[in-house]
Image (tube, rainbow, N blue to C red):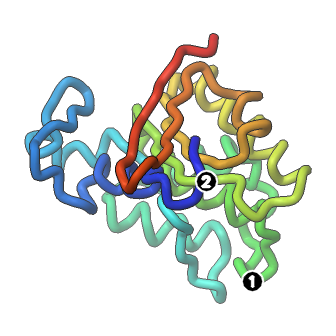
């Protein structure tokens, strides 16, 4: 959690290797980041900024494109659509999806391949209260039922505190970024 510009997205980009860890200080799954990738991507699903879709394709077809690139089966697409409660809308064109549906499909894409860790950058940003509730319930369900660890960023403290077990606050002071973490539950 932290204000805009505090380093939340930058931290997440470092965790997935988009920004170089020059000090080789980051460890995920007890491995240095440099040793983890590229094979480590199979254990991590991430959504930083927003997913890009082919609007002329259905939600199902958008998932198929990603799963084919990753050599995953169609049954994996079916599994994640059921998880995010979009199975009934799978044949709808993306241009007809609501923002909340697009966000759930984005999360479905991160779940392809059954990752152990999800890294989600402000997944409720721009959603109405009902959309926020749907995403919150989905993330809690994924954590409890699928045993997925979710690393999430937000500046919406009241929304995030309803679902987290640990928190980390980022704040800047005199152009330096500081981090404070604590266990919630």
Q: Residue 164 carries which label?
A: none
Residue 133, quarter of picture: top right
The percent coordinates of residue 30 (x first, y second) are 20, 24
View extreme (front): residue:
174
Q: Is residue 30 above or below residue 178?
A: above
The percent coordinates of residue 168 (x first, y second) are 50, 31
Q: Foreground residue, 48 or 9?
A: 9
> In terms of sequence position, does the residue under pointer 2 or pointer 1 come before the other?
1
**How crowded is the residue under tag 2: few (<14 C-alpha within 10 Å), some, or many (20+)?**
many
View extreme (bottom): residue:
56
For disc 2, the marked residue is: 122
Residue 99, quarter of picture: bottom right
Q: In this view, does 68 lie above or below 2?
A: below
Q: Is residue 157 above or below residue 47?
A: above
Q: Foreground residue, 170 or 143?
A: 170
The percent coordinates of residue 150 (x first, y second) are 52, 34
**Residue at (63% x, 11% y) in the render:** 185
């Amino acid at each position: 959690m932290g204000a805009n510009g505090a380093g939340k997205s930058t931290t997440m980009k470092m965790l997935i290797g988009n920004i170089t860890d020059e000090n080789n200080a980051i460890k995920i799954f007890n491995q240095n980041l440099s040793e983890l990738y590229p094979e480590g991507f199979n254990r991590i699903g991430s959504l930083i900024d927003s997913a890009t879709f082919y609007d002329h394709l259905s939600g199902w077809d958008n998932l198929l494109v990603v799963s084919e690139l990753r050599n995953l089966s169609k049954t994996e697409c079916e599994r994640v659509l059921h998880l995010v409660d979009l199975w009934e809308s799978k044949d709808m064109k993306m241009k007809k999806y609501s923002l909340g549906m697009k966000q759930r499909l984005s999360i479905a894409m991160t779940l392809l391949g059954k990752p152990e860790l999800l890294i989600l950058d402000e997944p409720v940003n721009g959603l109405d209260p009902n959309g926020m509730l749907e995403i919150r319930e989905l993330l809690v369900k994924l954590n409890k039922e699928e045993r997925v660890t979710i690393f999430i960023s937000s500046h919406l403290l009241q929304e995030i505190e309803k679902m987290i077990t640990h928190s980390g606050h980022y704040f800047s002071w005199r152009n330096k970024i500081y981090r404070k973490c604590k266990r919630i539950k």
